[in-house]
């Protein structure tokens, strides 16, 4: 059980209000619950599997739900990131998986066959006060409205609606289709890619502010990089340019491509970053992705003025905490690690640099809660997720986990927060792209593209990009987006 003695006024006020009304109403008789209510209020275990964050950041939410539904035993289990998906897939295959679990925003296509999409309503038992002379707590079977598609699009940033709403067949008749839009998962937080800086290194180089655009970023890198007498890098200006040793290199490259006007995938999910978008037809001779690829890999090309990084450097996060690079691209989830490994680092965090005079484009990376198709308690599971997403409850998570909000209504209050303000400020302009049934294979294809393109003759870009497109295309299910 997760109930504690903490006063949750927002919950208990309902009970007190009912007691007051009943005391005014006078004496009367009550009757016991019907069979459906008895069945719905039987002792039930709801298993919840999470990753990244431990139970402590969810504890208050679990407590609050248990107050309203005392018959529910909420069992939370947290996994390490490196073990999570393997454990999840094995458990589902053996019918011992969770009722409620987290999926990454890039996993939706892969997990659609395993997800029970959110129903329009859920039937759950709730505890209410009944009786007049003799008042008692009893269970009542309620039909509760799930968040609607319209409200979901209003409540959440565009990237969440794009990722988490799917057209699915909800027909219960085998030979008949009933295609409807349904929510498949709900996030509590949306992380965004930002620029971390070692302010001591910037100060020493006379750089007063963290660059806001890519031109200033290039200029800063030139001032920051240092070489020894053999031409080896002793201090990198930025950890960017390669694939294998740069944290989330595919995200940085994709962000650059999208900032430059690239459409990463088409309406059916097939990768299109090797093409000139229709909106740029006649304005470009080559796909804008080529320019983004060249810009990214120049930082790892010894023949370029902005050369500052190479494959011999350590992992980009390690290099940053060791003071070996001035700039590091990362998410809010990197912040605790940086502070733990380098507590004396004079740290600065700024928005992702943009292309001057182009629309602002940021990059989203987040987790969302969903329900297993094999769950025996799908109504209860989705009811719990809808409970978590409410502003009061989701704020409990955000405050404890120090994460940027997913709900639009909560972003404004986070902007001045030292830890999450920068990340929250980018949520409304953040984008993602569909990576089919094997997002890891898609990431691997971009990493390979990056490392192949370093120093490559630009005339060979079409071949290199098309190889990446072909590999990602193989992960797209027949018929397109799922």
Image (cartoon, rainbow, N blue to C red):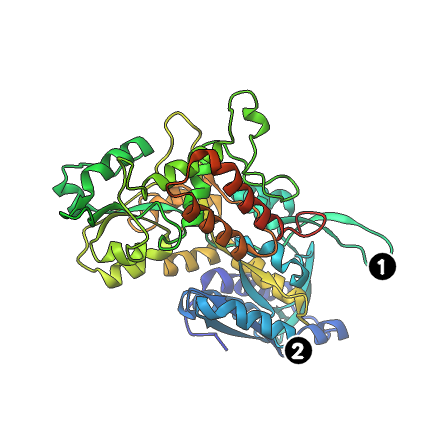
Disc marking residue 174: 1
Q: Is residue 318 left or right of residue 471?
A: left
Q: CA distance from mark 1 to mark 2?
A: 32 Å
> Quadrant location of residue 237?
top left
Name, please, the residue furthest toward the right: 175
- Viewer-side residue, 146 vs 328: 328
Q: Is residue 343 positioned above or below 192 on the image?
A: below
Mark found first going from the N terminus, 1 or 2: 2
Name, please, the residue furthest toward the top: 282
Q: Dot 2: what SS?
A: loop
Q: Is residue 393 positioned above or below 194 on the image?
A: below
Q: Residue at x 63, y 42 (%)?
A: 150
Q: Which residue is mark 2?
A: 42
- Viewer-side residue, 329 vs 122: 329
Image location of residue 149, percent across then percent down: 64, 46
Image location of residue 228, percent across then percent down: 15, 48
Q: Dot 1: what SS?
A: loop
> Quadrant location of residue 128?
bottom right
Res 176 visible: yes
Q: Residue at x 20, y 43 (%)?
A: 225
Q: Is residue 458 positioned above or below 419 on the image?
A: above
Q: Is residue 179 left or right of residue 91?
A: right
Q: Is residue 42 left or right of residue 386?
A: right
- Residue neighbourhood size for the residue with mark 1, other residues' Cα within 10 Å, grouped as few (<14), some (14–19), many (≥20): few
Q: Is residue 420 positioned above or below 54 on the image?
A: above
Disc marking residue 161: none
Image location of residue 275, percent across then percent down: 57, 34
Q: Is residue 378 left or right of residue 244?
A: right
């Amino acid at each position: 059980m997760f109930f504690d003695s903490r006063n949750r006024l927002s919950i208990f006020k309902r009970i007190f209000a009912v007691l007051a009304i009943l005391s005014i109403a006078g004496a009367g008789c009550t009757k016991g619950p019907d069979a459906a209510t008895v069945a719905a209020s039987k002792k039930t275990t709801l298993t919840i599997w999470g990753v990244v964050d431990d139970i402590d950041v969810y504890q208050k939410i679990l407590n609050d739900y248990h107050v309203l539904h005392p018959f529910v035993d909420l069992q939370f289990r947290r996994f390490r990131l490196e073990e999570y998906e393997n454990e999840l897939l094995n458990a589902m295959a053996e019918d011992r998986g969770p009722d409620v679990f987290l999926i990454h925003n890039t996993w939706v296509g892969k997990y659609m066959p395993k997800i029970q999409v959110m129903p329009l309503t859920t039937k759950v038992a709730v505890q209410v006060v009944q009786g007049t002379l003799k008042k008692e707590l009893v269970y009542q079977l309620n039909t509760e409205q799930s968040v609607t598609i319209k409200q979901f699009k209003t409540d959440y940033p565009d990237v969440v609606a794009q990722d988490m709403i799917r057209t699915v067949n909800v027909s219960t008749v085998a030979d008949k289709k009933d295609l409807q839009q349904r929510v498949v998962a709900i996030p509590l937080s949306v992380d965004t890619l930002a620029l971390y800086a070692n302010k001591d290194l910037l100060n020493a180089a006379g750089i007063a502010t963290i660059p806001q655009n890519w031109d200033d970023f290039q200029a800063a890198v030139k001032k920051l990089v240092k070489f020894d007498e053999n031409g080896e890098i002793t201090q990198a200006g930025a950890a960017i340019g390669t694939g294998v040793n740069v944290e989330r290199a595919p995200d940085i490259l994709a962000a650059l491509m999208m900032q430059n006007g690239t459409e990463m995938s088409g309406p059916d999910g097939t990768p299109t970053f090797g093409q000139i978008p229709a909106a740029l037809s006649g304005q470009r001779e080559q796909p804008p992705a080529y320019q983004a690829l060249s810009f990214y890999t120049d930082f790892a090309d010894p023949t370029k003025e902005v050369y500052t990084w190479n494959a011999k450097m350590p992992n980009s996060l390690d290099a940053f905490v060791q003071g070996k690079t001035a700039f590091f691209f990362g998410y809010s989830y990197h912040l605790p690690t940086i502070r733990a490994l380098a507590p004396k680092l004079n740290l600065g965090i700024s928005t992702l640099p943009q292309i001057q005079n182009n629309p602002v484009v940021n990059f989203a990376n987040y987790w969302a809660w969903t329900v297993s198709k094999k769950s025996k308690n799908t109504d209860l599971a989705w009811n719990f997720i809808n409970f978590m997403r409410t502003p009061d409850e989701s704020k409990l998570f955000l405050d404890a986990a120090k994460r940027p909000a997913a709900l639009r209504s909560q972003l404004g209050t986070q902007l001045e927060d030292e830890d999450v303000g920068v990340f929250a400020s980018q949520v409304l302009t953040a984008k993602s792209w569909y990576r089919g049934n094997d997002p890891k294979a898609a990431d691997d294809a971009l990493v390979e593209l990056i490392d192949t393109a370093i120093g490559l003759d630009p005339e060979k870009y079409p071949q290199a990009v098309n190889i990446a497109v072909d590999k990602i295309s193989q992960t797209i299910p027949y018929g397109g987006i799922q």
